[in-house]
Image (cartoon, rainbow, N blue to C red):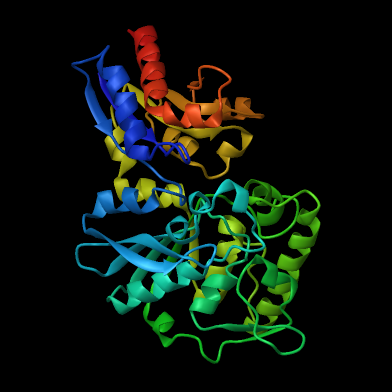
Amino acid sequence: MKVVILPDSFKESLDAMNVAKAIHKGFHSVFPTAEYHLLPLADGGEGTVQALIASNGGEIESVEVTGPLNETVQAKIAFSKDHKTAFIEMAEACGLHLVPLDKRNPLQTTSYGVGELMIYAIERGASELIIGVGGSSTNDGGIGMATALGYQFFDENGKEIQSNGEALLKVASMTDKNKSPLLEKVKITIAADVVNPLNGRNGATYIFGPQKGLTANQLPTMDEAMMNFYSIAEQYMNKSVSEVPGSGAGGGMGAGLILFANASIKKGIELVLEQLNVVEVCKDADIVIVGEGRMDGQTIYGKAPVGAAACAPSNAKVIAICGSIGDGIEELYKHGIDAIFPTIPAILPIEDVMKNAFDNIERTARNIAVLLN
């Protein structure tokens, strides 16, 4: 029997590799002679660097950059063996995990560190950047990243403004006269974890703002601020990006990279699946196991479980293991997933759930294996 294990991370709990190991441990206790393939995935959010470097070899470095609250953080960046390609994860510089719960406020967080990582990669010799733009604490439209690249933004009095989410309320003009010339030397591909547009009810602010700390009362104001900022920036750059699918990824970082760094955009999970050659690995598989921390109706929009399920042979059983499930879960049965198993055993404090994630996943995997035996 061939079992392919293709999980994404369980956010703020376990990385994808440890999720895969927990699933393998549970299944192996029941099927010790099966053929197992563990391929941790990512969809543009956390874990993208690790997933991509696994397919390309190379090395991971730690770089000191500006964090989401303007503090110094250590961010990982990966390079291919020939150093021609750099893999950057937005979440390394301004991820939600870097901001304590009581300090989560997208008006104050910045993506400046992402721009610093880009400059570092190009200075180290990279001619191609692959940038994962999920899992951020920011809703700054990429203004922080753009500022690090040399763009300047001004208020109505001509005063240069700080590059955070609040800045979007104040931008009246901009200039690219000090833009880094290094950008001309590099090809940039965005690995986006969602297909949401920049603005509106399905855009960056309304869909992802609340989990980053925006209140319901702030959503209309910040969505309008994002719209105003891009109206000015698109006119200056003579380019329209707001309606591009995925432009709302990373709190508007998708739009920012397209507009300010001339990037192209691709679904993160598609890029990772290609790099890892997952279709070939899944060939002749009997069981394909997918999963992530939470699965709901949004999971069909560019997330790892559905992307991975599409790689499974038609006769394979596709099983999803997740931490919890939410509204719209039935949509996943129309996208190649046969059964979904949440792992949280009881109503517990979130700290306990996260602490016991490995054991909960292992137990759930073992129970599934017993059913299949």
| Residue 183 appears left or right of 139 | left
Q: Which residue corresponds to the image point at 46% horizontal and 52% vertical from the top-left?
A: 44
Q: Is residue 93 above or below residue 371?
A: below
Query: Where, by quadrant of the figure, is residue 203 drawn?
Result: bottom right
Query: Where, by quadrant of the figure, is residue 60 drawn?
Result: bottom left
| Residue 45 appears left or right of 41 | right
Whether residue 336 is visible: no
Query: Where, by quadrant of the figure, is residue 163 drawn?
Result: bottom right
Q: Position of residue 205 (x, y in %)?
A: 69, 55
Q: Nearer the viewer, residue 72 or 361?
A: 72
Q: Nearer the viewer, residue 283 or 36?
A: 36
Q: Is residue 335 above or below residue 177?
A: above
Q: Which residue corresponds to the image point at 52% horizontal and 71% vertical from the top-left?
A: 145
Q: Position of residue 320 (x, y in %)?
A: 46, 26
Q: Which residue corresponds to the image point at 61% horizontal and 53% vertical from the top-left?
A: 104
Q: Is residue 111 above or below residue 295?
A: below
The extreme bottom residue here reads 177
Q: Position of residue 286 (x, y in %)?
A: 32, 21
Q: Quadrant of the N terminus?
A: top left
Q: Count up the numbered dots.
A: 0
Q: Quadrant of the C terminus?
A: top left
Q: Nearer the viewer, residue 97 or 329?
A: 97
Q: Is residue 248 above or below residue 46?
A: below
Q: Position of residue 81 (x, y in %)?
A: 19, 62
Whether residue 266 is visible: yes
